[in-house]
Amino acid sequence: MGEFSPWHLAIVALVFVVLFGARKLPDAARGIGQSLRIFKAEMKAGVDGEPKPADTPAPQAPTASAELPQAAPAVAPTTTTPVQQPTTTS
């Protein structure tokens, strides 16, 4: 009762064809394959401890924009004055 037979796999395949259509199945399988390859490569890189040299960006020299002073804010700060409370006169 707990074993899978070829009939079980055939029924599952038939359900996939009915749900997704025969045209989309190759694209789905291709996407799953690419995802698995990426996952395996990332796992291997994690086990090795260091990322590949091509994956790490090269250090960049400081650019001239880093030396420029910061620009003033576009909107001038506003000050608020307290609102006078109405006084009652008798």
Image: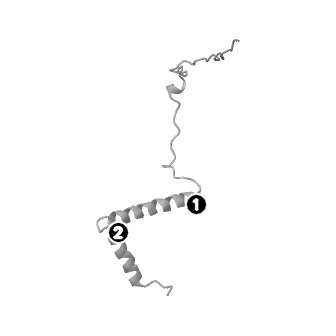
Where is residue 50? Give x, y as percent: 57, 53
Tell me: residue 62, above or below residue 15: above
Quarter of the figure that contains the C terminus: top right
Mark 2 and mark 1: span between their CA atoms?
A: 38 Å
What is the three-letter code of the residue carrying label 2? Leu
Q: Which element carries disc 2, helix, strand or loop?
A: helix
Residue at image position (46%, 83%) is: 4
Where is residue 87? Give x, y as percent: 68, 14
- Write down the residue under mark 1: 47
- Write down the residue under mark 2: 19
Residue at image position (52%, 47%) is: 56
Tell me: residue 33, above or below residue 2: above
Badge 2: few (under 14), some or many (20 or more) residues near its Cα, within 10 Å? few
Tell me: residue 7, above or below residue 63: below
Which residue is situated farthest in the bottom direction here? 1
Q: Which element carries disc 1, helix, strand or loop?
A: helix
Residue at image position (37%, 79%) is: 11
